[in-house]
Image (spheres, rainbow, N blue to C red):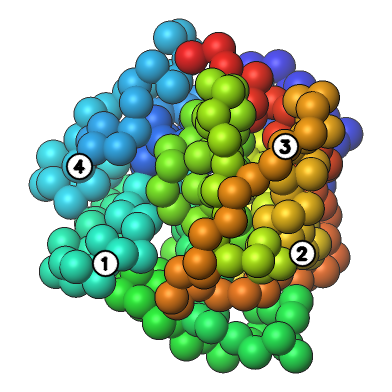
Amino acid sequence: MINILSGVLPDFYVEEWGVLMKILVTGGAGFIGSHLVRLLLALGHDVTVLDNLSTGVREHLPADGVAFWELDDRAPEARAHIAAGRFDAVVHLAGQTMVDASIRDPHFDASENVLGTVNVLEAARASGVKRVIFASTAAAYGDVTEDVLPVAEDLPLAPLSFYGLTKVTVEHYLALYQKLYGLDYVVLRFANVYGERQGDKGEGGVISIFAKRIASGQGLTIFGDGGQTRDFIYAGDIASGIVHALTTEHVNTAYNLSTQTETSLNDLVAIFGKAVGRELHPAHQPAREGDIYRSTLANEKAKALMGWQPEVPLEEGLRRTVAYFASV
């Protein structure tokens, strides 16, 4: 293969990986996975996607250039396929991502997020995988007080849902796998991700909901006074962060991927208006019980140690997202 990244990646990466890698992306037909797969292919990597299509969509992936396995990561067949694949690295995005679903059915949540991951890790260690990238979440931190914002990676983890707990549990599994078996890992805790091909649920779903309604000419509703803040990050920047995690020398640790910027829902609507070229006037409903009022994650560690930073401004990301939903 042509070394398209020569002079871009650190020397250790060229020496260790031979520049281009054979990479498995679990959950690759999902929202974030579809952004990542496109980037990995553009960089020349050999990409295989494993997805059971419970929430992913096969059409979200390019028609050519990517191998696809329609398998559940908990299945024995998945373990056999992964072991036989002899991958250099695994990016583990597959899993149950809904807080409310985890509370309704903790058994299902644990099966998807813990047992599925262990199945992947067992196949990885048996087949000589060099590195696992794990998609964790800001929900690992729980409901923090405003005086610790933006939340840094060394804050004690105190999840308030089984979803957050399973992510923290897997972080502990990864640390022990590294200690016992030498399998390197990088944990990435995502802020509120948004972008093309996103569903309405999950931690960044408000943007998907708003974008779809704007694209179809419907009105918007804000619950509460609109002063509540979130740290919105474009999915393409998350994909870039994952690529940096595949190449960094600083492994066996956790990084936040965020913009380290608080955006209120009122400001979000105003930025949406700029993105689409018209004023938007949302309706307001009573605040929903349990909603966190302010949220943002620190990103200095990822910038300093991985050399990553978010590139897509919120207005541009919203413009792309609305254009996508207007076209489907």
Q: Position of residue 297 (x, y in %)?
A: 70, 70
Q: Distance between the residues labelled 2 and 1?
A: 27 Å
Report whether 308 appears left or right of 142. Answer: right
The earlier-in-sequence mark between 2 and 4 is 4
| Residue at numbered disc 2 | 262
Q: What element carries label 3?
A: loop
Q: Distance between the residues labelled 4 and 1?
A: 18 Å
Q: Which amino acid does label 3 sit on?
A: Leu
Q: Are marks 3 and 4 in contact (CB under 8 Å)?
A: no
Q: Which residue is drawn at 56% across and 75% down?
A: 292
| Residue at numbered disc 1 | 102
As rendered, which of 88 and 219 lies closer to the eye?
A: 219
Residue 57 vertical placement versus 199 (above, below): above
Q: Is mark 1 on a helix, strand or loop?
A: helix
The earlier-in-sequence mark between 3 and 2 is 2
Q: What element carries label 2?
A: loop
Q: Position of residue 259 (x, y in %)?
A: 77, 57
The answer to whether residue 163 is seen in the rendering is yes
Q: Are marks 2 and 4 in contact (CB under 8 Å)?
A: no
Specify the farthest residue to the right. Answer: 7
Task: Between label 3 and label 2, give the one nearer the viewer.
Answer: 3
Q: Distance between the residues labelled 3 and 2?
A: 20 Å
